[in-house]
Structure formats: C-alpha cells, structure tokens
Amino acid sequence: MGNERIATESDDTAAAQRRGCGPLHPLRGDSDASVAPLRQLIFESVRAEGALSRVEIARNLGVSPASVTSAANELIGAGYLEEITAPRRDAEPTVRGRPPVALAVQAGAGLVAGLKIAAATNSAVLHDFAGNAIADVTEPGVGNAVSPDAFDSIADTLLTTLLDRAGRTRAEVHAVGLGLPGFIDSAAGTVLWSALLDTAPVDLRDRLATRLGVPVVIDNDANLLTLAELWFGDGRAMGNFAVVTIEHGVGMGLVLNNRLFRGARGLGTELGHTKVQLDGALCRCGQRGCLEAYVADYALVREASTALDWDPSELVGSGRMLAQLYEHAKSGDPAATSIFRRAGRYLAVGLANVINLFDPELIILSGERMEYDFLYADEVLAEMARAAIQVDRPAPRVEIHAWGDLIWARGAAALALSQLTAQRLGAPGVLEDT
C-alpha cells in the first residue's frame, strides 16, 4: 500500500528487546545542548541508551572524559546514576581483568504518572525515573463535556486507581503529566478550549496540582503522542517528524530539530483547524471549513446520517455507527465508500500542507481511526504526493501506528519525566540527594 508501514504495540516491545533495554528517551535528547548543564546532558544520554561508559558519554557529547567523570560522580552522589557492570557490545573482544563499568539511571530516584483523559477512554501509566513502566490502567472516558470540578475528580480517581494497582503511594509520585484534546497552553498550564470541558479558559495545571497534591504539567494529547514517538517509538533517532492523529478530532504534533514544537501560544500545530473549505462544514471549535469537520469521527457520522439516512439515536454511540459505515464501505456500498474517499481526499490536502510547510522526514498517522484503511489508501497517499511540492526527492515516508490507548499516557509520563529532569538537573547549584 505505497510507502507506509503499519506498526503496533508488539513492534515497540520487540524493538526494546532487541536493544537489550527499554526505549527510555530520545536518542538525540530533547534538551537544548547550548543551555542545558553537562550533568543533565549526561543523565539524558545514559537514560537514552540504558547504560553507557564514561568514555562513550564523552565521545557522544564531544567533551573531555575528565569533565564527564566529575559530573557523573556528582550525579552518582545525588542518587541519579549508579555504576553497573557494562554490557559487552557484540563487536567488542572479550578481555581478562576487571569488568568494564558503565553508568545507568537509578530507577528509584522517583516515580512519575502519565494520564490521558478523553471522551471514549481514559488511561494512565506509572513509570520510574529510568522510564520503565511499572503499572497501567484504562477506564471508560468522560463522554460529554464536564465541569472543571468533575474533571479534577476524574483525574484524581484515575491516579488513585493506578497507584492502588501498583501498590504505591501518592507520596512516591514526583510529577504527573496530563494530556487532553483541545487548545492547551502548556507553559501557562491553561486549557484555552477543550471539548471535554464545559467552560474555558481553565487554569487546569494549578487546580489539579492542588487536588492531586503532586506537581502537574499538561499538554495537548497529540503533542503527548508525539512525545511518546520521540521517546519510545520510531522518532527516537529522527530530528524532524510529524504525528497526525485521527479520532474524535484531528490533532498533530511536530518535532523540529529533535524538540517538540508548540508555537508562541501552544497552538502551533492545530492541523485539524486549518481551513480546507471556506464557509464549509461546521467544526466543533465553532468555525467553519476546518479539516477536522471533514475527517474526524463526528464528521463521518454527520455524513452517514445524511447520505445513508441513518438515525444516530438508533445506534449505540458514534463508534458503532462508524463500524457499520465501514462494513458498508468494505462491502462495496457506493455511498459509504464515497464518504471515506471524500474524507481521504481532504486528509491528503492536509498532509500535503504539512509537507510543504515543514518538510518532515516522516509522517506518522495514528489514533483509533487507523482501523479505517480508506483514510490512508494508495489513492490518498498518491494525492498527497501530487499536492506536495515536486522536487527530485520522494515525498516523506508515511507510517501507520496503531499503538492503542496506553501510548498517549506514556507520552504524558515522558512529559512529566522531561520536566522533572530539567527541574532537578537543569538548575544551577549543588544537587540534592533524591
């Protein structure tokens, strides 16, 4: 089916096993090397690889071994790194004498939780400071929009359920990352608008931190899925890639020069709300002609209700209605097939615009609607390539990732780990013991 590859959760696990350690961090790091202290760069390098010798760290970072030794000793003394017997590389000869020593992250330096709250499914994961998964949980989502107080209660209950499953206490959690759909100012901790909340704006970070008793960092859920790809997926070794999510809405995350791009107001990659039809269909954001209004779940349900004369109230939820629509399309129903093909054409235009604006190495399509292959059929990818700028190089590779619900929460945990690492190791001064 063209140049795309379909990946699943099992691919992620197998890749980790082949490397001999879990995928715990972007291989190129997500910190700005020009401003981050050496100790932070050393720590992130070790977490990325699982275990590294001081010589390997010095070579990778382009600094002197003496500088690495000094900073590494400081990290060991503060309880962030530990010395272990270095794993032998396959290409290295076996030698006698004292076993080589490597550095590894001290996993017990702290726990972080990642929460993803959505209309259909809520999910949560608990990770240690090395990035290893300890426990996870999934529950039914919030459904329709709720009040901020109700949202806080949902997040609180989800965290409690996660910790009970892990047999851990809230006092052991040093940070919570939270993802939800909508327009999110991550730096300010504010939800500017979300379909899950019945009011906006909401200072969600601060009120949740008070409710949970743990520092909280929030972000758009598509950004967190992109962070998960950067930390745990195919984006680990890539400097520039885009993730486009298709579920109840259409989201996008973008990595430029190894770092997540958010824009000045946190609205830098709202692909679903770019306009593909002036004065077109009504989007749930209140504007007209958005890409989301032609591709997302509610758009397909609207089209099915009109073209096939279906009554949504006679079916159990939009998911069931979409499943029936897909079955009709697969059986050759021209009206159902036309609905998916129309959505695919609009998606091709949106993806071509991403290529023309950012020239990514890779575009990852993800989300629950990847089960509907009409959205990424050969003709969709061909139309995307035709609409992209034509040069002497092929269009970026497209991959289809169907990780499941937990990958979103893993991205939230990565956000919490990244922030916690920067707070503990990025600030000047003497490290405190963990």
Image: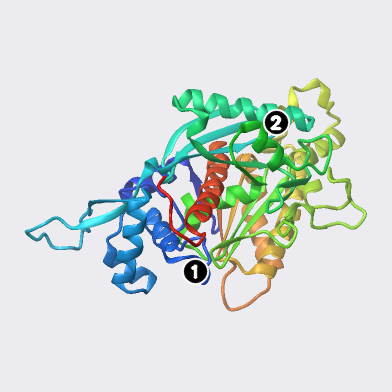
For disc 1, the neighbor class at 10 Å (few under 14, some 14 to 19, many from 20) is few
Image vertical order of residue 259 relative to residue 119, above or below: below
Q: CA distance from mark 1 to mark 2?
A: 36 Å
Q: Looking at the rendering, which quadrant does residue 409 occupy?
A: top right
> Mark 1 is on which residue type?
Ala
Name the image quarter holding residue 407: top right
Question: Which mark is drawn over residue 152?
Answer: 2
Is 158 situated above or below 287? Answer: above
x%, y% of residue 284? 84, 42
Amino acid residing under circle 2: Asp
Q: Nearer the viewer, residue 49 or 208?
A: 208
Residue 143 shows in the view: no
Q: Secondary structure at mark 2?
A: helix
Residue 376 in percent (x, y) is at 63, 51
Residue at left offset 60%, top offset 33%: 213
Q: Quadrant of the C terminus?
A: top left
113 left or right of 89?
A: right
Viewer-proximal residue, 210 or 289? 210
In the image: residue 318, left or right of residue 261: right
In the rendered image, which residue does mark 1 sit on? 33
Image location (x, y in percent) of residue 359: 62, 69
Q: Seen from this angle, which residue lies furthest bottom? A: 392
Q: Say which mark, if any, is on residue 231.
A: none
